[in-house]
Amino acid sequence: MAAFRGFLHEGKTDLTASLGLRPRKGGKCEAPLRLERMSRRDALIKQALQRLGGNKPQGRSMLAELLGADDLVLPACFSFAEPVMALRREAGGRLEISERQIARIATDQPAYRKKCRT
């Protein structure tokens, strides 16, 4: 209610930020919807990788190629088809992700390493 009150009566112009739908400056991964989407993506990547034989270089490279392919249709007889196709559906087609990012997700590290200024 405070967010709507501020928007309607106090002249605050950024309703999405007041509702918590937009992250603070510099915190792009803090928006609740983005966090939910990223955790769903990570869970599907882990599931697909497990069905491809675990966190091995061959499985990671195959998963990266499957996710990055242009027009991919996998038959349901493959055990890894369901999570791969779900990932592609949620991404709206192909998903550009590297083997290194997949390895970091599989070991519960952030997909992108934070860059620290020194």
Image (tube, rainbow, N blue to C red):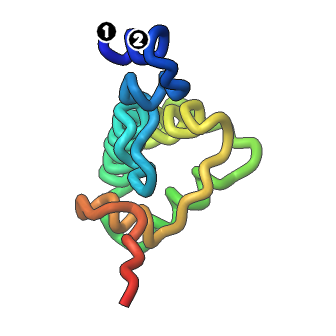
How far across and down, in percent of the image, does residue 22 sit? 45, 35
Q: Quadrant of residue 54?
A: bottom left
How crowded is the residue under tag 2: few (<14 C-alpha within 10 Å), some, or many (20+)? few
| Residue displayed at 31% across by 65% down | 55
**SS class, disc 1:** loop
Q: As drawn, which residue projects farthest toward the bottom?
A: 118
Up-down: is 7 above or below 17? Answer: above
Instruction: Report the residue marked by disc 2.
Output: 4
Is label 2 in contact with label 1 (beta carbons under 8 Å)? yes
**SS class, disc 2:** helix
Q: Amino acid at mark 1?
A: Met
Return the residue nearer the eye: 27 or 82: 27
| Residue displayed at 47% across by 16% down | 7
- The circle on residue 67 is none
Residue 109 horizontal side relative to residue 21, left or right: left
Instruction: Report the residue marked by disc 1.
Output: 1
Placement of the N terminus among the 4 image quadrants: top left
| Residue displayed at 60% across by 49% down | 95
- Please say whether residue 48 is visible from this viewpoint: no
How far across and down, in percent of the image, does residue 78 sit? 48, 39
Q: As drawn, which residue projects farthest toward the right?
A: 71
Placement of the C terminus among the 4 image quadrants: bottom left
How far across and down, in percent of the image, does residue 21 sit? 43, 29
